Amino acid sequence: MTVQFGYPEDREARSAARVRALEALLIEKGVITGATVDKVLGHFETDMTPLNGAKIVARAWTDPEFAERLVKDTPAAVAELDLPIGMDGAEGEHLQAVANTPGVHNLVICTLCSCFPWPVLGLPPYWYKDPTFRARAAREPRVVLKETGLDLDPSVELRVWDSSGHSRWFVIPQRPAGTDGMTEQELAALVTTESMIGIAEVPSPAA
Amino acid sequence: MEATATTTPTSPLHDTCVTDMNAPTFDADWQRRAFGVAVALSEFGHYPWDAFQQQLIAAIGAWEATSAAEQGSWQYYEHWLAALERVLVDHDLVADDEMRALLGA
């Protein structure tokens, strides 16, 4: 661990002890079982991953009518695909897709905490939860995008979507050049989490 | 904060953070357990997710309102844990005195 992100060992140990005691108490009181927690964690770690989002994006790239339905009623369109069960739970019921176009780029943030479309993107990356990122992405999104490597043309409209408990946004990035004739599966492999948050574009495989 | 905006750091985001497809999400097991407990309780109807979310927003808001000298380094899951403790008491899943005993331990 680097010094920059380190914090006192006892602080870490205290938090760990608090969680252990809390879980033990809830189990003792019969509120939950350890197995329940394991099952929920397993669901998040194996079923709800960015691979779901990548499959949704690849379908939208290859099926314009699906892309239209996806933006209009995201949960219903997502349900058409063969994805792990439970896509409509764990906040999946509030999924809302927004599509990038040549003239519009979308960026998803959560200024208040770290709302994130878990079922399609998994758990948020570290920086998404960072207080500086959250504040700056709301205040000067173009600058933040530029610093992270996405230099938007001034003519491109930038729409910033602030997530909440009721709207879990995710971005359908633009299909990159040089992907004509690729299968849906090959396309899905190109889609990154970053592109579905809107912090990056999907790089062309030819580049 | 503005100073951050005008400088051009060479690498504002870390490689491990922007290529998170396969990166671990939790830095420590206690973070993983705290996440699992909070979500499991909501999934099984012990409280609506909104209730947890509001406590998380409040915990993070309190940290952000504290002066830099006093707030200590950022640790997201500490706020997560604080929110969990509050929502458990709010929804009578853990009694006040039980929580005090637990925190005092």
Image (spheres, coloured by chain):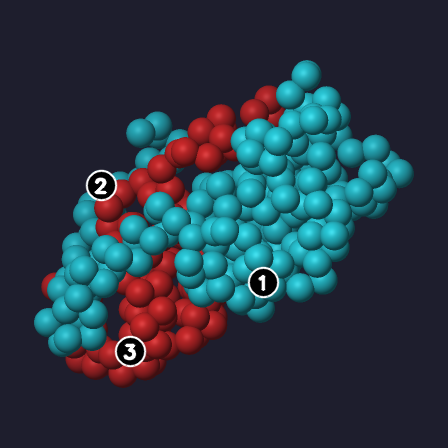
Chain colours: A cyan, B red
Is residue A8 rendered to the left or right of residue A82?
left
Q: Amino acid at mark 2?
A: Glu
Residue A108 pos. (x, y %): 63, 50
Chain letter, disc 3 residue: B
Residue that carries the numbered disc 1 in the rendered image: A75
Residue that carries the numbered disc 2 in the rendered image: A9
* Element type at mark 3: helix
B40 over A202 or under it: above or below: below
> Which quadrant is the C terminus of chain A positioned in?
top right
* Element type at mark 1: helix
Is residue B53 rendered to the left or right of residue A132?
left
Inspect this view and state whether residue A113 appears. Answer: no
**Residue at image location 43% in from the left, 53% down from the top:** A84
Residue B79 pos. (x, y %): 38, 58
Residue that carries the numbered disc 3 in the rendered image: B89
Q: Give the mark nearest the N terminus, 1 or 2.
A: 2
Is residue A21 rendered to the left or right of residue A206?
left
Q: Residues within 10 Å of mark 2 (few under 14, many from 20)?
A: few
> Which quadrant is the N terminus of chain A positioned in?
top left
